[in-house]
């Protein structure tokens, strides 16, 4: 594992340690399985499991993109929503961190 991947793994673990209700873990799981994702599509998935607002989901996605550095964001035109894609080199890393860390409310 490269030093950059080690640093990102540490950030992911810290990010998940602050997860009190499972929302962060769920969002990372959706991103991992979702391929291309927008705020709207992520909000649709999250609101089925958690009581939340679109702003909270957008903020969480922005944090994952900017602070964790595991997402690529692009916009085809100014009229279309931003599309987020998990960077290929971090797919296995995210999966392993999700499997290695304990979910909230579990013993």
Image (spheres, helix red, strand yellow):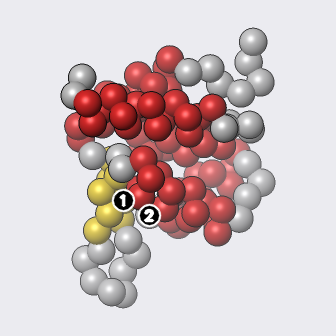
What is the count of numbered marks?
2
Name the foreground residue: 73 vs 35: 73
Q: Position of residue 75 (x, y in %)?
A: 30, 74
Query: Considering the image in quadrants, where does the C terminus appear?
Result: top right
Circle 2 residues within 10 Å: few <14, some 14–19, many ≥20: some
Residue 105: quarter of image: top right
Circle 1 residues within 10 Å: few <14, some 14–19, many ≥20: many
Label 1, label 2: how far apart the Cα atoms are: 6 Å
Q: Which residue is the site of mark 2? A: 38
Q: Is residue 10 left or right of residue 70?
A: right
Disc 2 is placed on an element classified as: loop
Q: Which residue is the site of mark 1? A: 84
For image coordinates 71% across by 27% down, the residue present is 104
Q: In this view of the protein, can residue 36 be seen by the observer?
A: no
Question: Please, which residue is most extreme toward the bottom here?
Answer: 79
Name the foreground residue: 2 vs 87: 2
For image coordinates 30% across by 57% down, the residue present is 72
């Amino acid at each position: 594992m490269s030093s950059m991947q080690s640093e990102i793994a540490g950030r992911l673990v810290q990010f998940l340690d602050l997860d009190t209700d499972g929302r962060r873990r769920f969002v990372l799981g959706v991103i991992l399985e979702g391929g291309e994702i927008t705020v709207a599509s992520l909000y649709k998935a999250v609101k089925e499991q958690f009581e939340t607002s679109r702003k909270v989901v957008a903020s969480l996605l922005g944090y994952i993109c900017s602070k964790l550095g595991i997402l690529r964001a692009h916009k085809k035109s100014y009229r279309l929503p931003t599309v987020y894609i998990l960077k290929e080199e971090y797919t296995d890393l995210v999966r392993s961190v999700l499997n290695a860390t304990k979910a909230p409310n579990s013993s």
